[in-house]
Amino acid sequence: MRRTGTTRRRYATLATAMAVAGMLAGAPAGAQTAPLPALHVEGNRVVDATGADQPLQGVSVLAPEQNDVCPSCNSRPTSELVALAAEWGSDVVRLPVTEIGATTDLAAYDAEYIAPYVQQAVDLGVYVIVDLHLVRDYGDTAGAVPRSTVERFWEYIAPRYGDIPNVVFEVFNEPIDPASWATWKAYIQPVVDTIRVSAPDTLLLMGSPQWSTMLGGALSDPIDDDNTAYVYHLYPNQGAPTEALLDAKFGDAAEEIPVVVTEFGWNPPGAYSDSITAGTTTNWGVPFRSYLDARPWIGWQAWILDNFWKPQMFDADWNLLGGEHQGQFVRDWLAGAPNVSPCADHDAVGTSVTVSSARSAAYGGDNLTDGDCSDAGRWLSADGDATPTATIELAAAQEVSSVGVYSGYAGGSGVVLVDFTLEVRTAAGWQQVAAITGNTQAAREIPVGVSDVDGLRLVITDPAASTTEAGIARVHELAVHG
C-alpha cells in the first residue's frame, strides 16, 4: 500500500480550504461555504474525518455538455439540477464528464463543465463526484480508449481538485472489454498512481469491466491504493433484485470492501425506458431499496435526474414521474419516506368504487382502492360480464398525473388485462385519456395529466389472454397518483 490512514493530509486551517474553493470561481475566500469533511476508506466503509459513515447517497445529473442535445426537451441549466438534487436531500451529486478525447482542451472544458458545479457543491454543502463517464472498451485495440487519454484527463483534473474535500473522483465510468479484472487492473493502476501524485487524499471510485459489473476481482486483487472504493452498476436487465442476486452482484463483496452503486434506475416499459432499464417501482425499486436500506454503509447514486437520458425522472416538460416510474420514488427515498409500493400508497385509497359485477363478495369493487395489492385484495368480475367496468369516486377533485392498473394474479399466465380504456371525469364530463391494447404488463402505469378530476372509469374489453383460465377481469388495484 502506498499510504495509510494515519498519514493522510488535512487542511492546516479552514481558511486554506475556503481559499482553494474560492479560487475555482475567482470569488473571495470569505464568500465560500466551508468544505465538507474529507472522505476516506476504513475497512468496508467510506467514512469522514471523524470516522462517521458517509455512504454517499444521491443522484446523477445529466452531463452539462449534453444539456441542449435533445431538440424536443425543455432543457434546464445544470445548476438548477444540482440545486434540486441538494433540495431533495442528496448528500452527493454525480457529475458525468462525457466528451473527453486525446485532444480535448481540458482547461476550457473544465472552466465550462466542471468548475462551476464543484463550486456550487461547495456552496450547497454536498459532495460531488467528478465522473469520467466513458462507456468504451479500454486498451490499445481499435476503437478502445488508450490509457494515455485517461491519464491526460486526470493529470489535469487531479491537481485542480485534489485539495477540495467535497470532491470525489470516479476514474472510468464503464470499461467494457477486455472482460478481465487482471487486464483492467494493469491498465488502470498507472492512472491511479498518476492521480496520487497531486491528489494523494481524494476518495477514488473504481469501476470494472463489463459496464462496471466485475468488481469481484477487487476482493482477491485490489487496486494498490488505500483510499479506493469499488463501483457497481445495476439495472433491471440483470434480473429481479432478490437478496440472492444482489448478494452475488455486489452485496457479498460489500461485506469486505467498500462498494458504491453509482448507477441504478428503472422506468416501466415504454417511452421512458429501454431494454436495459425497463422495470417497475413495485417489482424492482421497492425490493432494491429494501436491500440497500438493510445495508446502509453501501453508497448509491440513482441514474438520472433528467428529462432526456433514460431512465429519466421527469417527462420532457419537467413533470416528476411518479407511480411505477422512479422519479418520485427516488425523491421520497432521499427524504427518508417509507419504502412502499405505489400500488399500496396512492390518492384513491379508501374511496368509493362501483363495479359492473363481482364474482363474489370477497372480491368486490372496494378491493380496487384498499391498498392491498395481494391476490386476496383483487376485484374479480363475474362470469359472463362482457365489458367489466369499474368507476371510482374521488373524495375531492384533484390533479391526476397517472393511474397504475395492477392486474392478474401471482403465478397466473395470460391473466393480466389485455384491452381496456381509462376515462376521467371533470366538470366538463367524461373524457378518455388512454386506450390500451395488447397489454402484457401486470403493473401498467397510465399517464393522465388532467386537473380537477373527481372520478375515474376503467372499461375492460378483453380481460385476459389465457384460453384455459376463466375470461374474467382480475384487478388488484387502481392506484391514482396526483
Image (tube, rainbow, N blue to C red):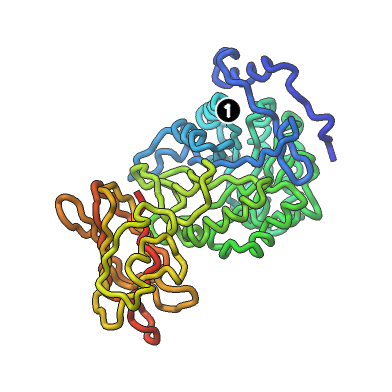
Query: Which image quadrant: the N terminus?
Result: top right
Q: Is residue 149 visible?
A: no
**Viewer-closest of 357 and 36:** 357
Q: Is residue 53 visible?
A: yes
**Residue 185, position as x, y percentages in the image:** 75, 50
**Residue 57, position as x, y percentages in the image:** 59, 42
- In this view, 341 is above or below 464: above
Question: Residue shown at 76%/42% (left/top)?
Answer: 190
What residue does disc 1 label?
125
Name the residue type under label 1: Gly
Numbered label tally: 1
- In this view, 183 is above or below 6: below
Is residue 382 found left or right of 26 in the rendered image? left
Neighbour class for label 1 at 10 Å: few (<14), some, many (≥20)? some
- In this view, 442 is above or below 205: below
**Residue 72, position as x, y percentages in the image:** 33, 45
The local secondary structure at tag 1 comes to loop
**Residue 325, position as x, y percentages in the image:** 43, 54
Question: Residue shown at 49%/37% (left/top)?
Answer: 88
Question: Residue shown at 42%/60% (left/top)?
Answer: 371
Residue lying farthest to the bottom in this orientation: 468
Q: Quadrant of residue 46?
A: top right
Is residue 163 found left or right of 7 in the rendered image? left
- In this view, 48 is above or below 428: above
Residue lying farthest to the left in this orientation: 428
**Viewer-closest of 340 and 137:** 340
Is residue 130 found left or right of 283 in the rendered image? right
**Viewer-closest of 57 and 430:** 430
